[in-house]
Image: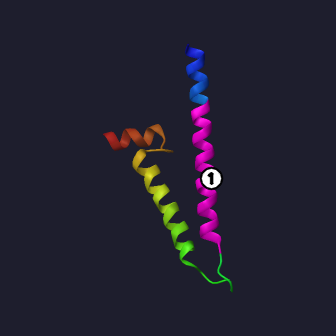
Amino acid sequence: MEKKRRIMDWVLWGIMYVALIALFMVLIVWMLGQGKNGEITIWNFVGLAGFGLVAWLFKALGIGEKEEDKKEVKA
């Protein structure tokens, strides 16, 4: 039973990473896209705001922080 749970965890992590990669690809296309004459469009700002939201979520959830940083915040 433990092996089945471990396999399911790996599958769920893989699905999550594929979803994140798809999200980042869309945000990159929106951020780097151009209008007909190479001008900036509203989608550039939407992509930039999307990356800002992702960065804020990572900060709020503590993703990517080192253990030392977490200890300092708690103290």
In the displayed orientation, state which residue is furthest to the right.
37
Who is closer to the viewer here, 30 or 58? 30
The magenta span reads 11-33
Residue 42 in the image: state x and y as whole percent. 53, 77
Determine if the magenta segment contains residue 45. no
Vertical placement of residue 11 versus 39, above or below: above
Front in this rendered view, residue 65 or 14: 14
Helix, strand or loop at mark 1: helix
| Residue in the image at 60% along x and 39% along y | 15
Q: Position of residue 17 (x, y in %)?
A: 60, 43
User: Label 1 crowding class (10 Å Cα cut-off): few <14, some 14-19, many 20+?
Assistant: few
Indicate the amino acid at tag 1. Answer: Ala
Q: Is residue 2 above or below residue 36?
A: above
**Quadrant housing the N terminus:** top right
Residue 7 picture quarter: top right
Q: Which residue sits furthest left?
A: 75
- Can you say whether 71 is above or below 48 in the image? above
Q: Is residue 31 left or right of residue 71?
A: right
Magenta segment, principal secondary structure? helix
**Quadrant in which the C terminus is drawn:** top left
Q: Position of residue 72 (x, y in %)?
A: 37, 42
Q: Which residue is mark 1?
A: 22
Q: From the viewer's perspective, is 8 left or right of 60?
A: right
Residue 30 horizontal/vertical position (percent): 60, 68
Q: Tell me which residue sits at (32%, 40%) in the image.
A: 74
